[in-house]
Amino acid sequence: MNTIAISRLVGSEAGEIAKRLAESLGYDLVDKAVLQGTLQQYGLTRFGELYTSPPNLWDLANSKNLEIVSMLNDTMQALAHRGRTVILARGGYMALNQYSDVLKVRLHAPFPVRVDRVMAREGFVERSEAEQRVLADDKARIKFVERFYGKKWHDESHFDLVLNTDIIPLETIQTWMTEAVRVLESKKPRADSKVAQQCKVDPLLLSAIDQALERRISSW
C-alpha cells in the first residue's frame, strides 16, 4: 500500500518508467494531467469560479499562486494516504519527504543524452532548439523546488534511490524500484516516523482525485 514519488528531469525517460511500474504493480499513475484535474475539481469545491480552468503548474512560480501550492501539497499527501500510487508530478517528493511509507526516487541522465531524447521525441530539427527546451524545463523545475520548499534541487539526500537512465536499462530500473517498494512494505516504521496512510485528509480531496483518475482512464 505504499506510494512512489518520482522526481525527474526532462529526457530522463521517467514517464515510460512510471507507466511500466504502475502497470506491473497495479498502482494508479498520477501525472500532470491527473494533478491538474484534481486541483481544478477540488478548487471548484473550495473556491468556486476562481478555479474554472486547470492551473498551469509551471505558473506556480508566481507568488500569487501560493494558495494553489498549498493545495498541491495537500493533494500529494492525499495521494500518499490512498497508497498504491506512482506520482510523477511537480515536487511530490518534497511534499512527502517526511513520510516513511513513500519511496522517493530521482531519475536523471546527462544533459547531452536528454537533449538527444527530446529531439527524437518532439521532432526538433536544430539541436540548439532542443538544448534550449531542456534548459528551460530544468530551470523551471529547479526554481519551483527551491522557491516553494527552500531546498536545493541537486541535494540528493532526500531520495531513497537515485538512478541514471543513461547507464541503467529501463527494465533494471523497474526491477530495482519494485524490489525497493517490497522492502519498504515489509519494513516496520520507526516509532518516531510519520506514516501517510495514517494521516487525516479531506474526503472531498480524495473524491477529486478519484474523479481525475477516472477521467484520465476514460480518455485512453
Image (spheres, rainbow, N blue to C red):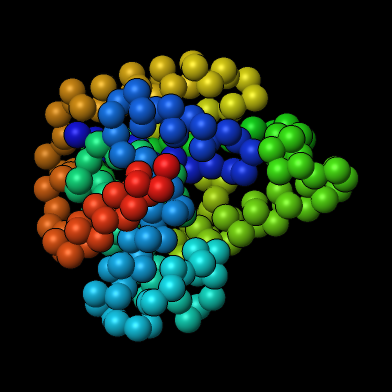
- The answer to which of 136 and 47 lies nearer the viewer is 47
Numbered disc total: 0
Residue shown at 44% from the left, 34% from the top: 18
Q: For the C terminus, which image quadrant?
A: top left
Relative placement, left or right, of 10 versus 77 is: right
Where is residue 15? Give x, y as percent: 51, 37
Residue shown at 30% from the left, 59% from the top: 75
- Residue 178 position by quadrant: top left
Q: For the N terminus, which image quadrant?
A: top left
98 up-or-down from 75: above or below? above
Where is residue 136? Give x, y as percent: 70, 56
| Viewer can see residue 6 | yes
Residue shown at 44% from the left, 54% from the top: 33
- The answer to which of 218 and 143 lies nearer the viewer is 218
80 up-or-down from 52: above or below? above
Residue shown at 73% from the left, 52% from the top: 133
Where is residue 21? Give x, y as percent: 39, 28
- Residue 177 position by quadrant: top left
| Viewer can see residue 71 | no
Relative placement, left or right, of 172 versus 198 is: right
Where is residue 203? Give x, y as percent: 14, 61
120 up-or-down from 53: above or below? above
